[in-house]
Image (spheres, grey):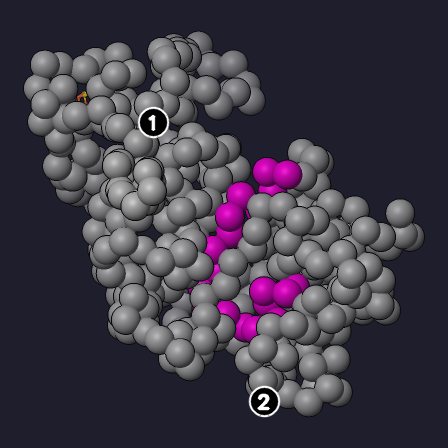
Amino acid sequence: MTGMDTQARPELRLITPNSTMRRSALPLDMGPGSPALLSVSNLVKHYPVRKGLLRREVARVRAVDGVSFDVRAGETFGLVGESGCGKTTTGRAILRLIEPTSGTVSFAGEDVSRLRGSALKAMRRNMQIIFQDPFGSLDPRMPVGSIIAEGLVVHGIGDRAERDALVKQAMQQVGLRPEYARRYPHEFSGGQRQRIGIARTLVLRPKLIVCDEPVSALDVSIQSQVLNLLKDIQADLGLTYIFIAHNLAVVKYIASRVGVMYLGKLVETASSDDLYREPLHPYTRALLSAIPQAKPPLPGEPRRERIVLGGDVPSALNPPSGCRFHTRCPVAMDRCRTEEPVTRDMGGGHTVACHLY
Ligand code: SF4
């Protein structure tokens, strides 16, 4: 282990107006009526299952099946659900790290799904990702300075000296000492490695970052440091996040709006406050009931009952008919088995897909 200062708060005010790393010009407008920076419409990602000599398609894994949501500039949109619900696939399909089967993704008014070649490369600079596994996502043979600078090289930004300056600045922003740029990933702790991953993203000054379970591989004591770092950086640079996680307590802490996914579908979307105060979808209620309460309820306050869902999440290869949640829903009705619920707007940006409403 190095003698690095893991507790140091990052220096967040190093950006000069003329720097190539200057703050995003996008407004930090998070009001309900503000335009969307990102618009995802009916996004689908199916994986064909092929068999036989002719590799005929015999089935499809419906990983993401018609997901739509907007993300406004400057907000953090949390995407939650159990593993296998399609949230990571959604994040990667938005960035076109995997090609969507259908649907559109519009970023700052431009249809990302149609971009090719240099236009797609330029868009990728604006839309970056922080991976879950801070060690697996870093090349162990490269010093961290080179890892962080890699995106700058790919995008042809700056000469050697300028890139070194940008790398130094990014390291300072995430609370890492620039003099450790020559060290290798294995010389850092898990939390420090995730800071390297964040610095690698920040150095390109993206407008949108997909944070794919960025703290779930970290010790609990380190998680809050990394979450606070992400919040500080967002406030300082006006970034927009899509924050993917299975831990609703983590999402509650960082997200301003939340979308709940189940088996490739978005079942509920609301502001973080609304969702945690008054969840509507039975699946959301069950997820929230599993969050440990920090303090016992006051006299007269209802005690939150734990809702234990029966069975496992069904396979995305053969999802249930009607409402996909009906095989586990404690309040399922007959029509839930045959009729797929449409998404209803309950007002105030709160949407839910359930026959109860
Ligand atoms: Fe439950 Fe039916 Fe609502 Fe699905 S539509 S969540 S099965 S009540």
Quadrant housing residue 289:
top left
Q: The residue under label 2 is which amino acid type?
A: Asn
Sequence-earlier tag: 1 or 2: 2
Q: On the rendered structure, is 77 left or right of 2?
A: left
Q: Which residue lies furthest to the right in this view?
A: 3
Residue 313 in percent (x, y) is at 36, 23
| Residue carrying label 2 | 18
Q: Is residue 186 above or below residue 156?
A: above
Q: Which mark is residue 315?
A: 1
Q: On the rendered structure, is 130 left or right of 167?
A: left
Q: In this view, does 16 lie above or below 27?
A: below
User: Element at badge 2?
Assistant: loop
Give the residues in magenta. 199-217
For label 2, count other residues whose C-alpha is less than 10 Å away and answer few (under 14), some (14-19) or many (20+): few
Instruction: Please report the residue visible at 63 percent of the width from the left and 46 percent of the height from the top.
Output: 133
Residue 243 in percent (x, y) is at 46, 48
Q: Is residue 16 above or below residue 141?
A: below
Instruction: Please report the residue visible at 59 percent of the width from the left and 67 percent of the height from the top.
Output: 202
Q: Quick one: quadrant of the C terminus?
A: top left
Between the residue at mark 1 and the residue at mark 2, the CA separation in whole angstroms equals 52 Å
Residue 54 in percent (x, y) is at 30, 45
Between 325 and 319, which is closer to the camera in this rendering? 319
Asked if disc 1 and disc 2 are in contact, CB closer than 8 Å, the reply is no
For label 1, count other residues whose C-alpha is less than 10 Å away and answer few (under 14), some (14-19) or many (20+): some
Instruction: Please report the residue visible at 46 percent of the width from the left and 14 percent of the height from the top.
Output: 298
User: Element at badge 1?
Assistant: loop
Quadrant housing residue 82:
top left
Q: Is residue 353 visible?
A: yes
Q: Disc 1 or disc 2, which is closer to the eye?
A: 1
